[in-house]
Amino acid sequence: MTDVYTLGEPLGVVSSGRVRHETEARLDVCGPEFTLAIALARLGHQAAYLGKLGADELGARALTVLKGEGVDVEDVRVTEGWHTGLVLRESRVAREPKMTHYRAGSAGSMLAPGNVPIDRIAASKMLHVTGITAGLGRDALDAVRAAVSAARNAEVMVSFAVEYVPELWPSVREAEEVLSELACDSHLLFLRQDELDLVKPALTPEREVVVDRGVKGASVRADRMRYDVQGWQVPVVDTAGAGEAFAAGYISAALDGLIPQERLHRGALLSAAAVTSVSDWQGLPTRAEL
């Protein structure tokens, strides 16, 4: 039985300093659901991933990584005539990295409701989706909705990470409508402090809400109680992937039957591991290392 089923767009990521001056860059593969699936697989959970890849070298690299990390890729599709999406991440001194997305017309953005395996989702313990995939276009949004509907009809827990990226949405208003809808359909909600206003209708007492509070750590409201955890003090190399790693750690602990404080603790551990690596996922621990 699959522990967590997730769907998204695998991406290539090029990391460098300011491109106009740099002569070197680093190539990796990433994606929020991609990172989460790998993190869970490393911790010994059965993670399944749905996505579309281009028939190109980036697509081959992403698929090789997923297979090598033990993620179930039965539903990953390689599509001829489409390219794998790419993100350019430029580091800046004392500022957040500048992210430039090259995703228009990518294979991953062509994910559609017909690609969603209703039976496999129904046979999983949890479905995890994000606002990033929902923001890729109408077909991708409908695919997310189809997956959520399948999970709810089968009484499978739905986990949703808001992951608001302004560049993916025509307007803030449309983002609020869609993200609030998906948040209200979830049982477990992950969001950053600055995303609280986007999903106000979902912030009800019966929902388990996990909030990333940045340097203040994280908190969860569960069973009408609030619990907090401080972030670990570690050397920060790159903050990319920290949110996905935290969600994976929290979900892993939930699957293990741990209480909210222990879920936060494991999430904080994985987040700390993520920021000490130049890669979104390569620094994440195995179960033995955890």
Image (cartoon, rainbow, N blue to C red):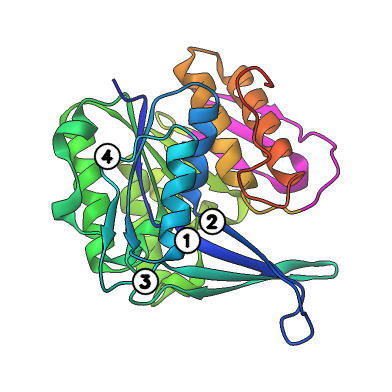
* Closer to the camera in the image, 151 or 29: 29
Residue at which label 2 appears: 29
Q: Which marked residue is nearer to the observer: mark 3 or mark 1?
A: 3
Q: Tag 3: Cα neighbours inside 10 Å, few (<14), some, or many (≥20)? A: many
Residue at which label 3 appears: 83
Q: Secondary structure at mark 2?
A: strand
Q: Amino acid at mark 3?
A: His
The answer to which of marks 2 and 1 sits earlier in the sequence is 1
Q: Which marked residue is nearer to the observer: mark 4 or mark 1?
A: 4
Residue at which label 1 appears: 11
Q: Secondary structure at mark 3?
A: loop
Q: Give the spatial CA distance, label 4 vs label 1.
A: 18 Å
- Residue 203 in sight: no
Q: Secondary structure at mark 4?
A: loop
The answer to which of marks 3 and 2 sits earlier in the sequence is 2
Q: Amino acid at mark 1?
A: Leu
